[in-house]
Amino acid sequence: MNSQKIRINHLSVEYRKVQALRDISLEIVPGKVTGLIGPNGAGKSTLIKGMLGLIPSTQGEVSYGNQPLKQQLSKVAYVPQRSQIDWTYPVTVWDVVMMGRVRQTGWLRGFSPSSKNKAKEALMRVGMSAYTNRPIGQLSGGQQQRVFLARSLTQGGEIFLFDEPFVGVDHRTEEIIFDIFQELAQEGKIVLVVNHDLGESITNFDHLILLNREVVAYGDRQSVLRAENLERAYSGRVRFFNLEEDYDDRRTQCKRHPR
Ligand code: ADP
Ligand code: MG
């Protein structure tokens, strides 16, 4: 079973003099579903891109095991935020899922039967087998996210990074996706999920990273979701009811405070 961690050490990112991330240091462990939360503009997407070396950092490093993470991208399955995907691109569900095998196979060599089986299994696992030949642009938001999840499963990496996978997704799909995240964690994968919503679904995360340009808190869900942490991250714009009480048994009380 994989026991390698991602270690982020003093990572800072600037966009043309705007400091998006300041001195981020933390660890992301396998075997847990970790949520990356924080207000809009907190730098959540920037953190994922910075970890992968997709944008330059001004300082710091990110390792996985004993090597820089950006030198091990073949182990990473990354699903970007919806807004960064071109949904009009004329590809079918099958094409999207098979893209998960390109790195292993290469476009020109054709896909092996085992690659195709992996893709079929993944589509079944997310409940999308019936849509195999549909153009991706014709699906609902929830169906599209399931297809991208299937692609990441087909790729078969060790590290799974999802940026806001629940935007525009129905409740049933959210449950399916969280179940798969839990299964991946139990297989010893690293699972990091950006989620800006602090609704009930937050109880599906084992660990949380609360970000607002810097790390406000990270660790066990309960220890992160304390009033003083949320106050610092959200400047008092979000509150929880009975926060200090046992969170797990009181799912229904975790709500946005009426404004
Ligand atoms: P989040 O994902 O938490 O909403 P982002 O990581 O997208 O936040 O953005 C963090 C900050 O960096 C925001 O202030 C945003 O406006 C800025 N930013 C993000 N991407 C760029 C970019 N390509 N160029 C300039 N500024 C950016
Ligand atoms: Mg974002």
Image (tube, rainbow, N blue to C red):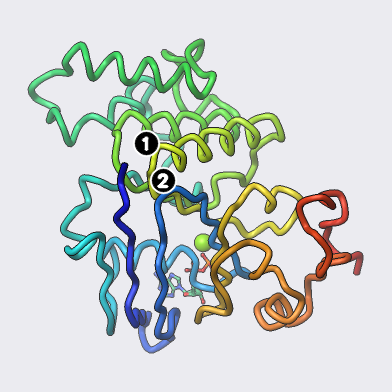
Name the outermost residue toward the bottom: 17
- 257 displayed left or right of 32: right
Q: Position of residue 233 (x, y in %)?
A: 65, 78
From the viewer's side, name the closer residue of 3 and 126.
Answer: 3
- 206 displayed left or right of 103: right
Please state which of the two labelled residues, at mark 1 or mark 2, is closer to the viewer: 1
Q: Residue at x 41, y 61 (%)?
A: 28
Q: In the displayed structure, would residue 250 be above or below residue 183?
A: below
Q: Position of residue 53 (x, y in %)?
A: 26, 65
**In the rendered image, which residue does mark 1 sit on?**
152
Mark 1 secondary-structure assignment: helix
Mark 2 secondary-structure assignment: strand
> Which amino acid is tagged 2?
Val
Circle 1 crowding by C-alpha within 10 Å: few under 14, some 14–19, many from 20: many
> Which amino acid is tagged 1?
Ser
From the viewer's side, name the closer residue of 224 and 137.
Answer: 224
Quarter holding the C terminus?
bottom right
Asked if the residue under mark 2 is in contact with the one under mark 1, i.e. CB atoms within 8 Å, the reply is yes
Residue 180, numbered circle: none
Q: Residue at x 19, y 53 (%)?
A: 72
**In the rendered image, which residue does mark 2 sit on?**
79
Name the outermost residue toward the left: 109
Place residue 77 in its image quadrant: top left
Quarter holding the N terminus?
top left
Q: In the displayed structure, would residue 89 be above or below residue 27?
A: above
Circle 2 crowding by C-alpha within 10 Å: few under 14, some 14–19, many from 20: many
